[in-house]
Image (spheres, coloured by chain):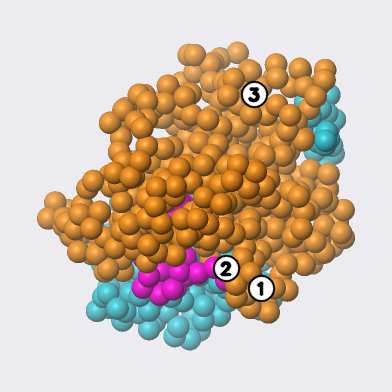
Chain colours: A orange, B cyan
Amino acid sequence: MSAQTLLDKLWSSHTVDSRSDGSDLLYVDRHYVHDACSQGFDFLDQASLFIRRPDLTFGMEDHYIATRPGTLRSEKVISLGGVLAKHALKHGFSSFGQGSLHQGIVHVVGPELGLTLPGALVVCGDSHTATHGALGSLAFGVGASEIAHVLATQTIWQRKPKALRLLINGRLAHSVTSKDLILHIISQIGARGGTGYVIEYAGEAIAALSMEARMTISNMTIEAGAKAGIIGPDATTLAYLKERIFVPTGQEGLLAEQAWKMLVSDNDASFDYEKTLDISDLEPIVTWGTSPQTGIPITGCVPDLDSNDESSRQQMLAMMGYMGLEPETPMQQISIDQVFIGSCTNSRIEDLRLAASVAKKGHAKVPTLVVPGSVSVQKQAQAEGLDQIFKQAGFEWATPGCSMCVAINGDLVAPGKRCVSTSNRNFMGRQGQGSRTHLASPLTAAASALTGRLTDVREVL
Amino acid sequence: MRFKPVNHLHGPCFSLAIDNIDTDQILPARFLHRSRQEGFKDLLFHDYLQQLKHTSESNFDWMHEVQHAPKILLAGENFGCGSSREHAVWALMDNGFKVVIAKSFGDIFFGNAINNGLLLIRLTDAWLKVLQAVATNQDMQIKLDQQQILTADGQTHSFAIDDFFKNMLLNGVQEIDMTLSLSDKIATFEQKQAQQYPWLQNPVAHS
C-alpha cells in the first residue's frame, strides 16, 4: 500500500460507498446536536424519519442557555431551552441540558467525556466542530439539511478535501499561547487559505502543546476556511484520554490504544501542499479588523493603507470605519469597554488558569465576564479557587455556555462598544449589533481587563 | 425531500463585490431561532446593509425590492464563510435569490446551498468582465444545462460545475433520498466496524 496521510487513513476507514462524481459516503461515529439545531429535527419530522443511531447521537445545551442571573432573555429564547430535551425524549438519545453534570459547550464536553476519540468521524451543526480534530478525529461542521441526513442515515456525502500539512517549528515564548499561534497562522494563510483542504498540524511546536492548547488550534482552523484541522495522536493525546468516562477500558482499551498509535501520517506520505512556519519569535497576537485574518502583534499598529491595491484599501477602510480605528494607531493605545473570557476556543481549565494568573495582579478597570466551558470546568476552577481570584479582581464568574461569543443568550456587547474576547470571530455584529471585537488569548484578555486598553501581558506578568 | 428544480433563469444580477462576506452578515445570529416555515423574508443582510450605507455611497435598496424575476447575486472571494447556519441560504432564497456567483465560497455554505437548490457558480477569470457588464445592465441569463452565463451586452461565459450537483439541481432531489436506499450497505459497514473498532460503535460510560 502506498504511503498515507492521516487524512487518507481517517477517510478510508469511514467510507461506506462511493459515487461516480468522486463523492464518498462517510460513516459518522459521533453526532453532537445542540440547542440551536432545531431545524434539522424539523426536517426529520416532516419527512417522517427517525434517528438511525440514537446511541451515537448526543445532545448538549450551550447556544441559548443563560450563563448569569442577570441575563435578559426573550420569551422565545427561554422557550428554546426545552426543545432539545423534547427531541431527546422522542428519539431516545442522551442529552446534557440545564442542571446536568455534563452540561457545557459541545466542543468542550465532547472531548472532556471521552466521547470524541482518535480515529472517529465527528459531525455537529456548528462550524467549530473542527475542535475535535485535535484528538486525531476527522471532525467538521454541517448545516441543517445535513443534520437531518446524519440523523436519518448516520452518514454524510463528502468529496475528499486536499491535504495540507503545516509544520510548526520552534517553541512558543513565555506568555505566548496556542491562541496567538493560530491567530498568527490565519494571518499568514488568510481567511480562505485553507479552503478545500484539511489541515494537519505537526512539528515540534505542536508536539509541545497540551491537549487543551491543541484544541484551540483545531477550533479556529475553520477561520482559515479549511474543512477540518487534525493532529495525530501522541503520548499527550493518550494521557489526556485516560480515565475519561466514555473511553474504552480493559482489553478493548488496549486494542484501541494500538489502533490510535497508527493514526499518524506515514513518513513518506505526500501532501497536496506543505508549509513550514517558525514561531520562536512569535509575540502575543490581537486582531484589529472584522476578519480573523487581521491578527497582528500586540506591539504593532493598525496597518497603514499605502501599501495596498485599491480594492484591499477600500475593504480595509471599511473595517477601520466599523472598528472606529485610524490607520497606524498603536494597538496598545486602543481603549476598551469590556472583556469576555470564554467560548469553545478558550474556556477550558488551562485557559482559566492562565487568565487567573493575570487577574491576581490587579483589579478590572472594565466589565469582565468569565464563562467556563462546562460544568466540569466550572467545578474544577472552583476547587482550585480560580473563581475567588476572578471575583477579587472584579471579574464576573458565570455558568457554562456559549454566552458572548455568539451572543444569542442575552449576553451582548452593546452597539459601538469595544470588547477584547477570547472567542473565535470578530465579524461585524458577532457579539451584538454594532459590537467591536478584538480577538486575543486569555492572557491578553485578562491583562487588558486590568488596564482598560489592549495590553501586552508581558508587562503585567 | 425535494426542492424546485433549477435550470434556465433570467433576472437581474446585483453586485456586492466584497470579499469574505460571512454568514453572520447574510443572516445575523439573533434570527436563528426562526423555523423554516416562518421564513427569513426581509432579514437578508439585515444589519450588513445598514452598515454599508454608513460606509459607502452605494445604494443597496435593491436588496429589498420586490422582484418577480429570480435575482442573482455577484460577490467576491470566500462568500458564506464562517458559521454553518443554513439560514444564510434560506435568507437568500426567501428574498428571491436563485443564484450566487462568486470567486470562491465557504465550504459548509456550499453544501448547504446544494441541499436547497441555490445554484452557486465559481468564476475566476471571467469574474471582472461579468462585474463590469452588470454595472451597466443588470439583466442576466443562466443556463445550467449548458453551464453558461449570458450578460445583457452579449457576453457568454461558461462555468464548471460538478455533474452530480448539476443533476441534483436539475432534478430537485436531495441527497437523503438516495442515501436511504443504501441502508443495507450502511448496516454492513456498522457490522464490520463493530468488530474492528467496537469502541466507535458502542460508546459505554465507565463511571
The reply, left or right, for residue A200 in relation to residue A173 is right
Say which chain tag 3 marks.
A
Q: Does dot 3 land on a helix, a strand or a loop?
A: helix
Residue A85 showing in the rendered view: yes
Q: CA distance from mark 2 to mark 3?
A: 36 Å
At label 2, counting other C-alpha atoms closer than 10 Å, the crowd grade (few under 14, some 14-19, many 20 or more) is many
Amino acid at dot 2: Ile
Name the residue carrying label 2. A408
Q: Are marks 2 and 1 in contact (CB under 8 Å)?
A: yes
The secondary structure that most of the magenta stretch takes on is loop
Q: Please check the rendered image and state whether residue B69 is part of the magenta-colored stretch, yes or no.
A: no
Give the residue number, with chain letter if any, for mark 1.
Answer: A77
A130 is higher (above) or lower (below) than A37: above
Magenta segment: A409-435
* C-alpha gap between disc 2 and disc 1: 8 Å
Residue lying at 63% horizontally and 69% vertically, measured from the top left: A69
Residue B88 in the image: state x and y as whole percent.
Answer: 53, 66
In the displayed structure, would residue A179 be above or below residue A313?
Answer: above
Mark 3 nearby-residue class (10 Å; few <14, some 14–19, many ≥20)? some
- SS at mark 1? helix
Q: As drawn, is A384 to the left or to the right of A393?
A: right
* A397 relative position to A90: left or right: left
Image x and y of residue A389, in percent? 52, 50
Residue under numbered circle 3: A238
